[in-house]
Image (spheres, rainbow, N blue to C red):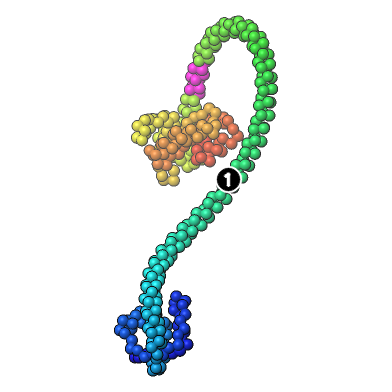
Amino acid sequence: MYPCVFKNFFIRFRSGIFYKKSILIVMPLSSSFIKLLEKVEPELRDVFLAFFDEIEKQRTITREEFNDLKEIVRDLAENLSKLTQKVDQLAEAQRKTEERLNQLAQRVDELAEAQRRTEERLNQLAEAQRRTEERLNQLAQRVDELAEAQRRTEERLNQLAQRVDELAEAQRRTEERLNQLAEAQRKTEERLNQLAEAQRKTEERLALLIKEFRDMRRQFGDLSDSVGYGLEDRACKFLPKLLERDYGVKVIGKLVQEFIFDPRSGKYIEVNIFGKGTRDGESVVIIGEAKSRLSKNKVNEFIRDKVNKISKIYENVFPVLVIYVRSEPDTVEYAKSKGVAVYYSRELE
């Protein structure tokens, strides 16, 4: 390629310098210049190539113009070298800027995370502040209540102080009364000594009365036994006829007093009226007692102590009671409702 320069051509470099020349020259491009062109940015390189295309179109050049062209080319080469150096510096600055931007981006991410944690902490602090304020309000209310309680306590203390004064006066009167009571106590002790002597004499008299009562009780027991035994003897004699008439129980042999051995307890059970018989073809065991005065409690005792225990030894137990009188109007009916036959002593004839 043989470029040539044309007149009135303007060139503007990145440094901001303008060159204006009017030349016409034909000359070949050196390899070093071509290498420099390869380092130039594409837009600037296109400008240079267009420039040299225009030069190639012009074939005539003067010596003076040729020298000017050489000067221009030298300036271009120098500026291109500076421009290349500037581009390298800018590239290095760009690399450092990108590294700094990456660091800043990482720092921004860290700051964003720290900001998020800070906001969470602020929310927690705000909630804690809210709870603290609620607690303070409660404490303030409690303080007011305590102040009111303190006021009532002071009023109560004033009342207690007044009461203490009243109690002190009452204590003084009480001591006076105690002195009076002490004197009364002394007189009472003298009276008690007199009463103690009277009590001793009374106890001696009571001991004599107890001895006499025991003698009377023994004599009455002997009389009761005599009455009971007499009633039981009559019952053993007349019950067989009454039992056969009223209940269809036919006594085999005689009714007697008997002791029945209880294998469960290993003891004997005393039965005042005992015998065996038949009723409707079945064997029965007759057990009975004589009571001078029949009550419901005695009916229950007879069933518990005699009937229930002997029923576990013999089958078909037939219980009967012989009495003089009853303690209540319905005592006899109560005994019969429990399955116990009852006869009055006057029926034993």
Q: Horizontal placement of 226 versus 42: left or right?
A: right
In the image, farthest residue toward the left = 31
Of 259 and 299, the residue lying toward us:
299
Of 83 and 251, the residue lying toward us:
83
- Depicted 186 relative to depicted 257: above or below: above
Magenta residues (range): 216-227
Amino acid type assigned to the residue bearing label 1 in the image: Arg
Q: Residues within 10 Å of mark 1 (few under 14, many from 20)?
A: few
- Say which quarter of the image contains residue 72: bottom left
56 in magenta: no
State the residue at coordinates (69%, 19%). 166
Q: Horizontal placement of 207 versus 275: left or right?
A: right
Of 44 and 342, the residue lying toward us:
44
Instruction: State the image coordinates of residue 191 (x, y, percent, origin top left).
Output: 61, 6
Evaluate whether residue 63 shows in this view: yes
Quarter placement of the N terminus: bottom left
- Say which quarter of the image contains residue 3: bottom left
State the residue at coordinates (44%, 31%). 273
| Residue position for label 1 | 135
Instruction: State the image coordinates of residue 135 (x, y, percent, origin top left).
Output: 58, 45
Query: Could you tell me which secondary element the residue under label 1 belongs to?
Result: helix
- Depicted 204 relative to depicted 155: above or below: above
Of 117 and 255, the residue lying toward us:
117
State the residue at coordinates (55%, 7%). 200
Q: Which secondary structure type mostly characterizes the magenta part of the structure? A: helix
Instruction: State the image coordinates of residue 335 (x, y, percent, origin top left).
Output: 53, 37
